[in-house]
Image (cartoon, rainbow, N blue to C red):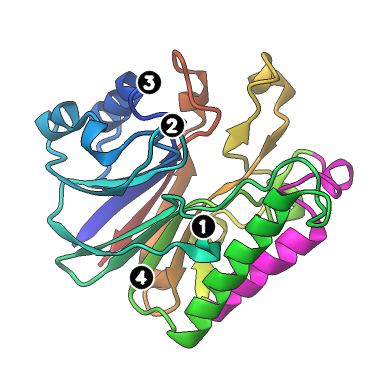
Amino acid sequence: MPFTLATWNINSVRLREPIVLKLLEEEAPDVLCLQECKSPVEKIPTEGFAALGYTHMVARGQKGYNGVAILSKLPMVEAGAEDYASLNHARHIAARLENGVTIHNFYVPAGGDIPDRDKNEKFGQKLDYLREMKEDFHAEKPEKSILVGDLNIAPREDDVWNHKQLLKVVSHTPIEVEQLGATQDAGGWVDITRQDIPDGPLFSWWSYRSPQWDTADKGRRLDHVWATGDISNAGHSSRVLRAARGWEKPSDHAPVFATFDL
């Protein structure tokens, strides 16, 4: 049974409910994973989503910060939530579909502005979070699983608008890229987006600081869709809905899609 999945850092699900509804109406993915919901679970505006057929939700939330949610047309059950790096943040939720596929939705810490854990506690937290993800995947290798979310790292040179200029900028530093690669390898994860779109610049985030974000195109690919090797060949039709970055009162991220024949 094919199903389409989208991942989107929405930057406040209540503030941006209208564009979530727009996405669900116009694109109709079977599953939508949201990050940075910035809402307690009980205040997520589920009525409008349910009216469009998204009657299933698993989520972790907190007031004003972080928060992850999985909305689905397909029946699913919660499959756990991890608090890596013991931050007490709502940054992970997992759900299992009836076909046995587990979907992990992550919001990895951004890491602050200074890429030095001695000078910037947030950067250290980001590295610790990734390390604990890696250790978890190494201890129990995931199977029949999809991992999505705002991982806050653009790993490849063509995942950023200027590789050389961003080497010392958080999200593209060598230590972050190395840590993300080790985390990916530990779980045997395949980057579905780049499996489908192997070459060329590809971005999913453009800063609010750039009012001419579209023409300047100084983006980064921070949002990812991975799958375990046992199902990676089932993934296809990857795309970034760049147009959503230009919608009214947008998130600074665009949704990333993939379809799986499972």
Q: Secondary structure at mark 1?
A: helix
Tell me where residue 242 appears, x and y as whole percent.
Answer: 52, 31
First in sequence: mark 2 vs mark 1: 2
First in sequence: mark 2 vs mark 4: 2
- Discs 3/1, front: 3
Is 61 positioned to the left or the right of 36 in the image?
left
* Quadrant holding the N terminus: bottom left
Q: Secondary structure at mark 4?
A: strand
Q: Which residue is mark 1?
A: 196
Q: Is residue 184 magenta?
A: yes
Q: Which residue is mark 4?
A: 145
The image's mark for residue 15 is 3
Residue at position x 56%, y 71% in the image: 132
Mark-to-mark CA distance, 4 and 3: 31 Å
Q: Amino acid at mark 3?
A: Leu
Magenta residue span: 162-186
Q: Nearer the viewer, residue 215 or 35?
A: 35
In this view, 11 is above or below 236: above
In this view, 76 is above or below 53: below
First in sequence: mark 4 vs mark 3: 3
- Tell me, yes or no, whether the two marked residues, 2 and 4, touch with CB atoms within 8 Å: no
